[in-house]
Amino acid sequence: MRVLLVGAGGVGTAITRIAARRAFFEAMVVADHDLARAEAAVAALGGDVRFRAERVDASDEAAVTALLERHACDVLLNATDPRFVMPLFRAARAAEATYVDMAMSLSRPHRERPYEECGVKLGDAQFEQAADWEKAGGLALVGMGVEPGLSDVFARYAADELFDEIEEIGVRDGANLTVDGHVFAPSFSIWTTIEECLNPPVVYEADRGWFTTEPFSEPEVFDFPEGIGPVECVNVEHEEVLLVPRWVDTRRVTFKYGLGEEFIGTLKTLHLLGLDRTERVTVPSADGPVRVSPRDVVAACLPDPATLGERMHGKTCAGTWVRGVKDGRPREVYLYHVVDNQWSMKEYGSQAVVWQTAVNPVVALELLATGAWSGAGVLGPEALPALPFLDLLTAYGSPWGMREQ
């Protein structure tokens, strides 16, 4: 396997550190718009000759296609933010490469009823091309991070191994992470965080299909394992709600994120001021008027999440809560994966949230390389068998857990 990794930020760099310990691939080209960042990711690997750095603009479909072909890469792993999903998705198809991402194509709210009906849903642009991928025998494995990704694998595992009937699947994400010296310091891309938290959340119900609600709706307190404890969680737009019902028979799917009142208040203020907008505005500068995206300015003013590890303390938990029936009796479980920031920093030099996101696509690549996973079309993680993934994740030294509720 020869991999083109596009994106050498926090998650991309963590991917290289995890992959460097595995032998399933022949080469990994690490490409970023900032060549120095790609070179730094490669240099940190201590001379592993399988890795090399390149510069590429992720929005330049032709350049990405050419890079895939020049290095004879048969897989494109997208570690950029969701703005670049579609050009990278199309570039992989043009080069006849397998495509893997951790977040799907962007949504657009319904114009008249944004908090009741879906407009363009997450992943719609990719699923519109599913028939072309399947006809060509190509595979696009979408949403293969931690959430979406591992959470979807948990949903498939629950359906195959734990339940006869499933009433509800709810992804629940919470943490007790703190960052010294920062009142507001998101542990993941603020661009993506704003996108998913301020868009109308999507809920799935079998008798209604997909529909939307108000941001931060339906608050509930969920008790997270391994010392994290109770965290208030709210509805947030996320890919699992769009993916799980396509392959798993369930009556309801939700995604709720433990954000906290202060974090929610900050996001609401950004929205109130228009600082969540991606459309460029004109601002004065010493060199004359310049066009900038308010959301990009917010991101530039906040610390890079990849640099927070040394100041971060605590654990992060990603998991899937499932309620249904087994052997005629009600059953309720929480399948989860916890990463302690102290462990991930000591072991890999990557903070917990980016490491937890990064390990899952590497596991998926290894399953594809060995043939344990295969398929054609545009597939989510729940379209593939769960046990090989969970076994290999444990073999990576990062076990998962299950709690009867």
Image (spheres, helix red, strand yellow):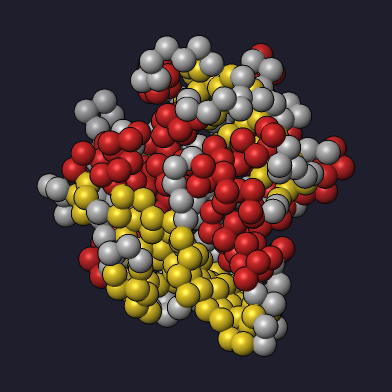
Residue 339: image location, x then y, percent: 36, 50
Residue under the point 65% across and 66% down: 161
Decide which of 403, 101 is in the foreground and name it.
Answer: 403
Residue 166 visible to an observer of this rendering: yes
Image quadrant of residue 38?
A: top left
Instruction: Count up the numbered dots.
Output: 0
Residue under the point 33% across and 35% down: 347
Relative to 328, does residue 106 appear above or below in the rendering?
A: above
Please indicate whether residue 55 sits to the left or right of residue 181 in the image.
Answer: right
Residue under the point 73% across and 26% down: 95
Residue 288: image location, x then y, percent: 28, 29
Decide which of 283, 359 is in the foreground and name it.
Answer: 359
Residue 394: image location, x then y, percent: 50, 47
Relative to 7, does residue 114 appear above or below in the rendering?
A: below
Residue at the extreme right of the image, as rendered: 135
Could you tell me which quadrant the C terminus lies in?
bottom left
Decide which of 342, 14 is in the foreground and name it.
Answer: 342
Could you tell me which quadrant the N terminus lies in?
top right
Residue 188 visible to an observer of this rendering: no
Residue under the point 69% across and 17% down: 72
Image quadrant of residue 85?
A: top right
Relative to 291, does residue 254 appear above or below in the rendering?
A: below
Please indicate whether residue 285 sits to the left or right of residue 51 in the image.
Answer: left
Please indicate whether residue 100 sits to the left or right of residue 96 in the image.
Answer: left
Residue 41: image location, x then y, percent: 40, 23
